Amino acid sequence: MTWQQIAAEKKSHQLDSVPKEWLSSTLPSAETLSVIDFPPESKVLSALDLEITESSVASLLSNLASSKWSAVQVTTSFYKRAIVAQQLTNCLTEIFVDRALARAKALDEHLEKTGQVVGMLHGLPISLKDQISIQGIESTIGYVSWVGQFAEKNSVLVDILESLGAVPFVKTNVPQTLMWPETFNNIFGRTTNPYNRSLTSGGSSGGEGALVGDPLGVGSDIGGSVRIPAGFCGVYGFRPSSNRVPYAGCVNTLEGEDSVLSVLGPLSNTLDGIKIFFKAVLSKEPWLKDPMVMRKRWSDEEYKLIDHGNGEKLCFAIMWDDGIVVPHPPVRRGLEITKKALLAAGHQVIDWKSYKQAEISANVVSVDGMTSTNRVLIRAILKSAIWNAAAAEDFMAAAAPTGEPVIASMGILQEDDELLFRPSGAAISAFELWQVHKKKRDLRQEYLKHWEDTISQTGTGRPVDAIIGPMASYTAPPHGLNKTAQYTMWCNLLDYPAMIIPVSKVDQALDAKQMREEFYTAEDQENYELYNPATYENAPISIQVVGRTMEEEAVIAMSEIVDEALRASKSNI
Amino acid sequence: MTWQQIAAEKKSHQLDSVPKEWLSSTLPSAETLSVIDFPPESKVLSALDLEITESSVASLLSNLASSKWSAVQVTTSFYKRAIVAQQLTNCLTEIFVDRALARAKALDEHLEKTGQVVGMLHGLPISLKDQISIQGIESTIGYVSWVGQFAEKNSVLVDILESLGAVPFVKTNVPQTLMWPETFNNIFGRTTNPYNRSLTSGGSSGGEGALVGDPLGVGSDIGGSVRIPAGFCGVYGFRPSSNRVPYAGCVNTLEGEDSVLSVLGPLSNTLDGIKIFFKAVLSKEPWLKDPMVMRKRWSDEEYKLIDHGNGEKLCFAIMWDDGIVVPHPPVRRGLEITKKALLAAGHQVIDWKSYKQAEISANVVSVDGMTSTNRVLIRAILKSAIWNAAAAEDFMAAAAPTGEPVIASMGILQEDDELLFRPSGAAISAFELWQVHKKKRDLRQEYLKHWEDTISQTGTGRPVDAIIGPMASYTAPPHGLNKTAQYTMWCNLLDYPAMIIPVSKVDQALDAKQMREEFYTAEDQENYELYNPATYENAPISIQVVGRTMEEEAVIAMSEIVDEALRASKSNI
């Protein structure tokens, strides 16, 4: 079979796996851009389905534990909603209804029989990025060559989630190679943004983003791949430090690239979903199942902000821009709303002085990746430092068996675009990679000092407690235009935990284009020219809260403080 | 100047830095092999000097805090003893008496004036492996080309030790390249073993070993470089997991090699020295000074063995051999003594089933490194996986400026030995290195499972609490014959914390050669043929206690239990 035939057959199997009664007969036309409010009109979801799928993770767990709602009911409701989302945004890869419902039924029976929940996540449906292996299910990550590779066993995270009582119910779409911040591949096609389908859902956990955290999903992040889709799709998303959430047993791209590690992290429509996921996973001592995981229990003390004056008066620093590209007006507005809310809540807010952001990005992806002449991110990766070290070999090896082309552009292809990616042959030696590592180490050391030195500006007796910044220089852009990840990947190089919090949505009346005539860089000008409010209408505006390495508990707690301040500020309007 | 002239001048400066009155006039002849009991006969040390230098770290700190002994007195006593050791074993590199005494004086004045100690290590002299930078002092690590490179600032550890009140007072000898388990270089020459000067002190922290932990020293360990000298020289030595003790600001070899990290660890003549060092360093929150350090405070709970049934009845597993090379009779005897002592103390002792030890070693250094035909470790490194990735380029670049040859053998050179090392040109690409990383990850995963699976054999309801094994297949061998590090470096690949505990000494009457006719491997036979009790007379016998990644507190606590059991067992004889 040709690779096209294999892909078509796989896609057809996917359609066959959907119960026909969950297919909406009232789908909006392709021209309808915003579909985020469509589910109630789908005629697929009952009033109870809607109530369940609009509940927070905490209230779902409570209603499941009290048997108000059965696991079968909750799983069915979320499944129906996910299938509607699939019809609207093409966000899913693997669909396994019978299996998930059988598991939900077993959980219900256990609860009925013993009076006890199986674990902290009893009955909670969880979506998983395609690469997270479930025994007996494929993880193609969009490579046609990997169709038919059924996982021999669960990834460690799936074992743990199941032991906690969770119900994995769908896998979600990704870009081929996983190394793009958009979502398109030759098997499952393109995932779109539910707030505006002419815009990207981001990537690489783009299917998770488009599912808008219903109710809890798991993505991975090596340069922003949890945070970009979370931010573009208006949900909470968390990139923990390396080695707190078990990654063992997932399939992956660039395997063996240990210089900047991909990490798994949750997406949810509420912050409590993020916290519950994190606490629950750590409660299972994942270091006894994955040797890479740090032996560090959930710390209630750190969550109570013992290292941050018990959270009484925090000092946040806002990174308005990175000195390379000034974000679009809505992004700026999101930061201004946040600043106002935090001041109103009694916290201190100062400006963050950007530090070597270009060098930091260059250490991961090259500076070339951010120049205006380079339209295609993958070429940037190939000229980069850490990722480039051997990306070409890796991508070609994965695609080769079926002759499938490596995708050269996430854009809507024009006639003159290249269809077939060719490796640049720019791979480096191990010795050259070691030199990159030295640079990385020095940058981390300098950045730590830069942060510590803010103690003189905060008035709290401590350095800045958290940085708040953009998660991209724009809100979700049109397909093919999400070309850099520079506002997220600095956290990957520095290994900082970072939380995405939705703040508002693009509003043409509030987010007019500002005239600018001076620019930091050529890409700043390019980014400026990209903006026009109409194109971005309705796109979510999100911010990023960044803490120190291994400070997950504190970042969750400080994010709750920020989120609460934002809520209070909205209710004051 | 030629490299020989530069080296000679440096060595001459070293001699000039020693106060003449600390040079012993009663030195034993070169034929006297055991010099461990010489200090009282040196006529350099007073009765008080001897009392001080034979005190434990805990009692030193207590007598310093109470002003019974001044910091100047304690520093002087240890300095005198170190200079005597230098004359006997050539263990030092940098000697800076005035500076150390000035610092000690300032500490005394602070205590007198404020009534308060400066910190947890007030007045304690600490020796440092040559690579640990002290502002204004050279760190040549034995490269002639690096003579004259004075450190611009302290390494983070030195900053922390000074803030704790410690007094760095000497730096200690290493092998050129740091990548040998013996100690010899073109500047400072060879360090010998104080228990038997015809034997190696081990390496690469060989100077630290020969100083026999008087009272506390810091080495580094990438394949056994703390544990081998500690074990060969009869002192306690600890290799913590990666990223608990700050390494930032040290000079190093193979910089940027992040696959198996070198870690700093303490050597001491008492276990309390190890614990005090570790607790004290963590109390200074080193993660705020070195971004690589894990944000993990000293845990009293873990020290109280909450993960090990509160230490009431532990199950140790003894690795009698690694399935590749059977250790010499004294090493076996050390393990038998330990087993008996632990059983007498009420603990469980079972056999450890070795698991893929050859593959683990090969992932770091190649299997070739253990074959009988390969007499020179450095060639093994060059045929190896992780270290080899770019070691040749690294060594040559460091040695090149002065034309100094890279040392090809740590042996007493014979005429037919090569003097000049030539790189094999076997460096690998980054992509090949990634494949090695995949193998490493799989080995760590499998080993974790292997350990967890022991739960069925222990009878405690837990997997084995700690592994006890040899730290080498021999006690300290003659110079040039310490060719492998296979009994230590498996802990580096797996990132397990490991403590060296001295047990006994080689005794010809007890350690007769056993007749063997069957061998695991060619190197097993070679190792067997190497043994003859007379050669190894008086060499310390040590064991290694190995725990799980990031379980430093528990390994220290379990080592105390083992040490106590050994003491009790001796006093019962």
Image: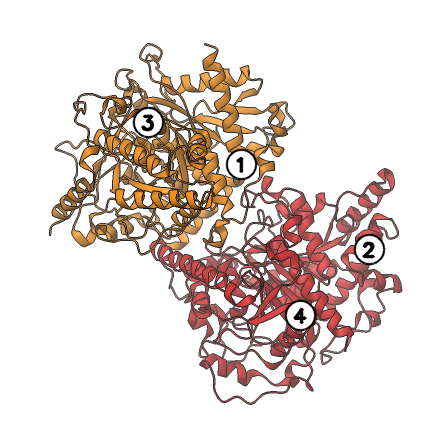
Chain colours: A red, B orange
Asked whether, in this view, residue B535 is left or right of residue A498, the answer is left
Dot 2 or dot 4, earlier in sequence: 2
Residue B155's disc number: none
Asked whether, in this view, residue B288 is left or right of residue B267, the answer is right
Graded by Cα atoms within 10 Å as few (under 14), some (14 to 19) or many (20 or more), the crowding at tag 4 reads: many
The quarter in which the N terminus of chain A is drawn is bottom right
* Residue A134 point in image, percent of width and height: 66, 49
Asked whether, in this view, residue B103 is left or right of residue B287, the answer is left
Helix, strand or loop at mark 4: helix
Chain letter of mark 2 equals A
Helix, strand or loop at mark 3: helix
Residue annotated with mark 1: B553
Residue type at mark 2: give it: Val
Residue annotated with mark 4: A342
Q: CA distance from mark 1 to mark 2?
A: 44 Å
Residue type at mark 3: give it: Leu
Residue annotated with mark 3: B48
On the same chain: label 4 and label 1?
Answer: no
Q: CA distance from mark 2 to mark 4?
A: 36 Å
Q: CA distance from mark 3 to mark 2?
A: 78 Å
- Camera-side residue: B246 or B380? B246
Chain letter of mark 1 equals B
Chain letter of mark 4 equals A
On the same chain: label 1 and label 3?
Answer: yes
Helix, strand or loop at mark 1: helix
Residue annotated with mark 2: A74
